Amino acid sequence: MYDWNLVVNAMATLLVTLDPPGLAPIFLGLTVGMNRAERTQVALRGSIIAFAILAAFALLGAGILGVLGISMAAFRIAGGLLLFFIAFEMVFERRQERKKKSSEVAITKDHIRNIAVFPLALPLIAGPGAISATLLLAGSLSSPVGRAALIGVIALCVAAVFVTLYVAERIDRYLGVTGRAILTRLLGVILAALAVQFVVDGTRAAFVI
């Protein structure tokens, strides 16, 4: 019989790594100015893209990075630097300045698609931590049944993320302009700290022999 305890452990590991409740407030800060339909579109596209990324790593494993000659340490550093740039814009409201200059055309289809890909899908949902966890779990669930179960686990976890982001949109109604400004800056600082931690972890791992 198949050891389904591994599947349960995989579910718990991915849920903790993805941290849906922790993503919700960051999602609000990244999508300030969008209406409900636009937020839902960003959340859905981001979740689908994140699922595709994690599923690819689950099926192909470390071979993806190996073929490109990229270590997980380098991936952590790159993801951290890109995330820090987003955090910088959130703290100093550079994104808001760009929106004001663009007036009513601030939120376009391309803008929604870009945010869904980066930073929502990568590296916030399918970040270095989630990819690392997926690679490790793929090693434990290496049989065909195990891989199929892992894909199912990833789908369920990403679905939980989407539901959390969908519900988070309603919170924005009660924040107001001042609340959104405070939340965006506060989350920008937290995001910056998270980004620095990615870089620190990646640098530490890169120099471990």
Image (cartoon, helix red, strand yellow):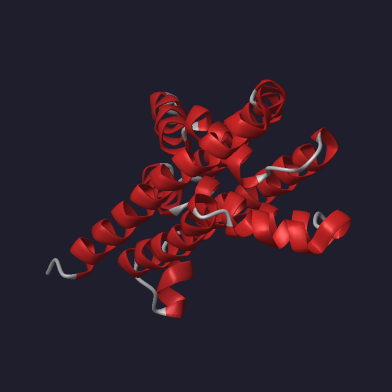
Task: Check the picture and name the quadrant holding the C terminus.
Answer: bottom left
**Residue 142 appears in view:** no
Give the residue displayed 37% in from the left and 61% down from the top: 76
Picture coordinates of residue 146, whole percent (x, y): 49, 39
Q: Is residue 17 left or right of residue 167?
A: left
**Residue 111 appears in view:** yes
Q: How many marks?
A: 0
Give the residue displayed 81% in from the left and 54% down from the top: 107
Picture coordinates of residue 49, whole percent (x, y): 67, 52
Give the residue displayed 80% in from the left and 63% down from the top: 102
Residue ranking furthest to the top: 174
Residue ranking furthest to the right: 104
Q: Nearer the viewer, residue 112 or 15?
A: 112
The answer to whether residue 6 is above or below residue 131 is above
Picture coordinates of residue 2, whole percent (x, y): 45, 28
Q: Nearer the viewer, residue 79 or 83?
A: 83
Q: Is residue 106 left or right of residue 121?
A: right
Q: Nearer the viewer, residue 167 or 131?
A: 167
Q: Is residue 32 left or right of residue 132?
A: right
Task: Check the picture and name the quadrant holding the N terminus.
Answer: top left
Give the residue displayed 45% in from the left and 39% down from the top: 186
The answer to whether residue 34 is above or below residue 122 is above
Picture coordinates of residue 24, whole percent (x, y): 57, 32
Q: State the image quarter where residue 207 is shown.
A: bottom left
